[in-house]
Amino acid sequence: MVILGVLAITAVGLGALSYILQTNTNIGQIPSLTMYLDGDLKPNATAIDWGQCEPGYTYTFPNMTVLNTGDVAYNVSLITTDLPANWLIEWQRNNTFIEPSMKLEGWLNLTIPISAESWPSWAFTLQGETA
C-alpha cells in the first residue's frame, strides 16, 4: 500500500514466533522457556504485530523478557528464517546463558532498509540450547 509516495508496510501476521529447545536432558528434567513482549505473554507459534512500518526505520519493543520456567539451563538465542539479508532483527540479550527460574530482559529491534518494497514472509525462533 502506498501512502503519499511513502511505502507503508504492515507487519501484522509477519510470521510465528517459535520456541525450539534443543536439550540433552536427563529423565525427569523439564525444559521450558516463556517469552513476554512489553509485558504481554507470547505463547509458542504466536504472530508478532510490529504495527505500521516504513522503510528506513528501526522499530523497537523496549522489553523482550525470556523466563526459564523449566529446570534446564540454556544458552538462548534468536534465529531468523527467511529474513532478507538487508533487514536486521536484534535482541539485546541474544546468545545469553539462562539458569532455571531466571529471566533475561532486553530490547528487540527490527530495522527495515530504505530499499524495502514489500513485507517479506519471515519468522524468528527463540532457541534454547543446553551446554
Image (cartoon, rainbow, N blue to C red):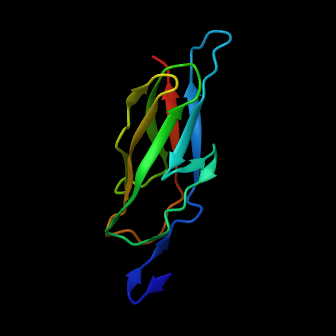
Does 38 sit above or below residue 95?
below
* Residue 52 x/y as whole percent: 47, 72
Q: Where is residue 21 in the image (x, y as percent from the top left)?
A: 57, 28
Relative vertical location of residue 89 with respect to residue 12 in this rendering, above or below: above
Q: Locate residue 18, reporting x and y percent.
A: 59, 42
Q: Which residue is drawn at 51% across and 34% down?
A: 67
Direction top: furthest residue: 26
Number of dots carrying numbers: 0
Task: Tell me where residue 70 appears, x and y as whole percent.
Answer: 59, 24
Q: Who's the residue at 57% across and 14% down the image? A: 24
In the picture, measured across the screen, residue 62 lies left or right of residue 22, that is left
Picture quadrant of residue 33: top right
**Residue furthest out toward the bottom:** 4
Q: In this view, does 28 lie above or below 39?
A: above
| 103 and 90: which is toward the camera | 103
What residue lies at 63% left-to-right and 15% top-to-bottom? Answer: 29
Quarter assignment of residue 31? top right
Residue at x 49%, y 24% (from the top left corner): 129
Question: Which quadrant is the C terminus positioned in?
Answer: top left
